[in-house]
Image (cartoon, rainbow, N blue to C red):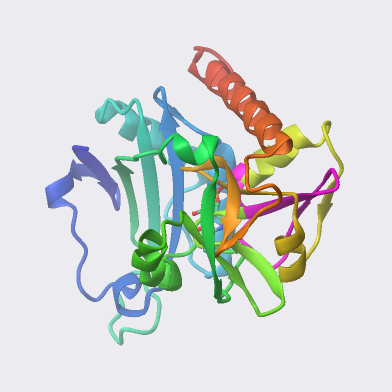
Amino acid sequence: MRYVYINGNFVEYSQATLHISDLGLRRGYAVFEFFRVLRGVAVFLEDHLERFARSAALLELEPPCGRERLEDLIRELIQLNALEQGGIQMLLTGGYSEDAFTPGRPNLIITPTPVSPPPAHLYQQGGKVILQQNQRELPEAKTTDYLMAVRLARRVRAEGATEVVYHDGKRVSEGGRSSLCLIKDGVLVTAREGVLPGITRKHLLEVARPLLPIEERPITLDELFAADEVLLTGATRQVMPITQIEDRPVGSGRVGPWAQKLMAAFQAHLEAYLERRSRPGPA
Ligand SMILES: Cc1ncc(COP(=O)(O)O)c(C=O)c1O
């Protein structure tokens, strides 16, 4: 990835720097956003820009430009880097702060990043998750607070897992970098409050709605253990079946029929989106 956008300019990656007084660095005060680019198309961009604006409002940070300008900048960045497949990260920090505490004028950075999609066997055999008691602050905002997920990344890998799932001792919320859905007796259940509004989850629910009943409500740990099927969703992993939680199998321990149906329906939905967006002319 050659070029990044930083505070009004497209610059070479190696030249993109911020001063050490930035509040994102000093206090972890920053909005974050991430989306995929597939076949040169920014996937579900309008949803990601809406969430970026909501996260900024929750952190009381004012982005330096509006949504249309951001869209233009992102398209320009994709072109400049001839980016066909990958991802884009957006960062809006608390800005330079003299006392290292009071927010200043936000710094905006938009960087293309390489993405390695998860291996195919996770979709064929399902993945494993580990559990961790944790609650993110301001869970509805996507921020740079990935403290627990980063801290546990080595343990996740060492245990042959693909993700950590957070709970509060009673209720399950979401994965470290993903949303969680379960299926029990033909009903899809997913939490809506106290979690990040996942964009992939939103699109999965859209395709799932005509197929099965959906309940958006809190999920208990007992319900998670008793689920027939469990799915994680996220921009990189898309829709991934989970067949093991710690050392317990989920349902039969195999990828279930709903997971297969929903993965296929999501894939078709994504294809249709890419097809619409790659055609010239109005979307
Ligand atoms: C905490 C958390 N929940 C859910 C998600 C999934 O969101 P999306 O589908 O928009 O990638 C993410 C993505 O990084 C996340 O960090």
Q: Nearer the viewer, residue 234 or 241?
A: 241
Q: Is residue 212 above or below residue 143?
A: above
Report if residue 71 is visible in the image: no
Which image quadrant for residue 98? bottom left
Identify the residue at image location x=41%, y=73%. 147
Horizontal side of 194 relative to 276 (left or right) equals right
Taking 190 as reference, is 3 left or right? left
In the displayed image of the protein, which residue is found farthest to the bottom?
Answer: 99
Q: Is residue 11 magenta?
A: no
Which span is picked out in magenta?
180-200
The quadrant in which the C terminus is found is: top right
Q: Quadrant of the N terminus?
A: top left
Q: Residue at x 68, y 27 (%)?
A: 265
Please provide percent x and percent y for residue 5. Answer: 28, 45
Q: Where is 202 relative to 218, above or below?
A: above
Q: Quadrant of ligand 1?
A: bottom right
Q: What's the residue at 64%, 54% (across, down)?
A: 180
Indicate whether 65 appears above or below 26. Answer: above
The spot of residue 67 in percent (x, y) is 52, 43
Q: Nearer the viewer, residue 136 or 282?
A: 136
Image location (x, y in percent) of residue 19: 20, 69
Q: Position of residue 137 (x, y in %)?
A: 55, 76
